[in-house]
Structure formats: C-alpha cells, structure tokens
Image (cartoon, rainbow, N blue to C red):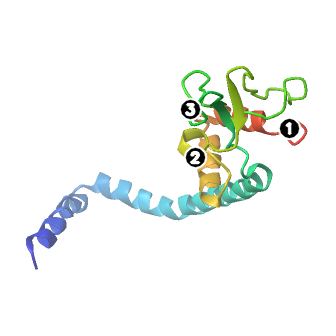
Amino acid sequence: MDLRTLRAIRVLRPLKLVSGIPSLQVVLKSIIKAMAPLLQIGLLVLFAIVIFAIIGLEFYSGTLHKTCYSIRDISVIVKEGEQASPCNTDNKSEAPFGAHVCDANVSTCMDHWEGPNFGITSFDNIGFAMLTVFQCITMEGWTAILYWVKQEICLSVL
C-alpha cells in the first residue's frame, strides 16, 4: 500500500462521527431512503429531455448555422450587439415574423457559422440537443434559444 491509498482512506474518517451523533444518523438515513425516489424522478426527467431532444432534432437539425458575414471580407462575422446571431436568407418583405435579415449594404447571410455558443446550442446531434433542452427547462437563457430558432425557421412550423 502506498501513501495515496492511506490518504484516500483518511478522507472517510469523518464518517465515524455519524455513529457518535444520533441526529446525524437520522439525517444520513433519511438521505439514503430518499435516494430511490429521487433516482426515479431523475430518470423521468431524463426521459422527458430525450423525447424533447428527439423532437428538436426532427424540427431544427442544422438550422442554426447561418449568420451575417461581411461583404468586404467573407471571413469576418458581422455581430449584432455582443454576439453573432442566426439570420434568414429571405428578403425583408418575405421573411417570417421576427427573422433577422442581414443588411444588404454591409453583409450577406451565409451557411458557414458554427452556431450560437460556439456550436453548443444546436439540435445537430442528440448530445447538443439534450444540452439545449436542459438549458430550456432550467429557464436559464431559454429566450435566446427561442428567438434564434424563431429567426431561423418559418413561423408556420412553430
């Protein structure tokens, strides 16, 4: 046995305190009893995330990869505010409600962008779709995803 193993075992020494303090025993037993129902609830939430991720894959796969690029230098992304946002290739008169259309004098909408949040916010594969759905159900930044998807696809699909 080397010293690392002994140090790892020393981490478990505070668990001896549980046997000496009855109130800690009650708390620990309650936590252990609650683990099975919490696991079932966690599996139910995971199932819901997977279902909505599959729906997102079907409707929005590959939609968040267009953004405005500069006409003068195609490698430069034209940002609206702090970050780039998805755009729609339709002109303003035919664009769906809420669609972001690039300024024709300065930029053009092209399909070479990795996507919002460095490509993580997307519905291109099941992993990223599950992360995006998780972000939406936690209600942290879900409105940005709503607007990006709404800008990218026709209102009739929503």
In the shown orientation, is residue 42 left or right of residue 24?
right
Residue under label 2, please give it: 119
In the shown orientation, is residue 113 left or right of residue 15?
right
In the shown orientation, is residue 151 left or right of residue 31?
right
Tell me which residue sits at (73%, 55%) in the image. Answer: 57
Residue under label 3, please give it: 76
Nearer to me, 127 or 5: 127
Q: Is residue 86 visible?
A: no
Q: Residue furthest bottom?
A: 1
In the shown orientation, is residue 58 left or right of residue 122?
right
Nearer to me, 75 or 29: 75
Mark 2 residue element:
helix
Mark 1 residue element:
loop
Q: Residue furthest front?
A: 72
Mark 3 residue element:
loop
Circles 2 and 1 in contact, beta carbons < 8 Å: no
Q: Quadrant of the N terminus?
A: bottom left
Label 1 to label 3: alpha-carbon separation: 27 Å
Res 84 quadrant in image: top right
Q: Amino acid at mark 3?
A: Val
Circles 2 and 3 in contact, beta carbons < 8 Å: no
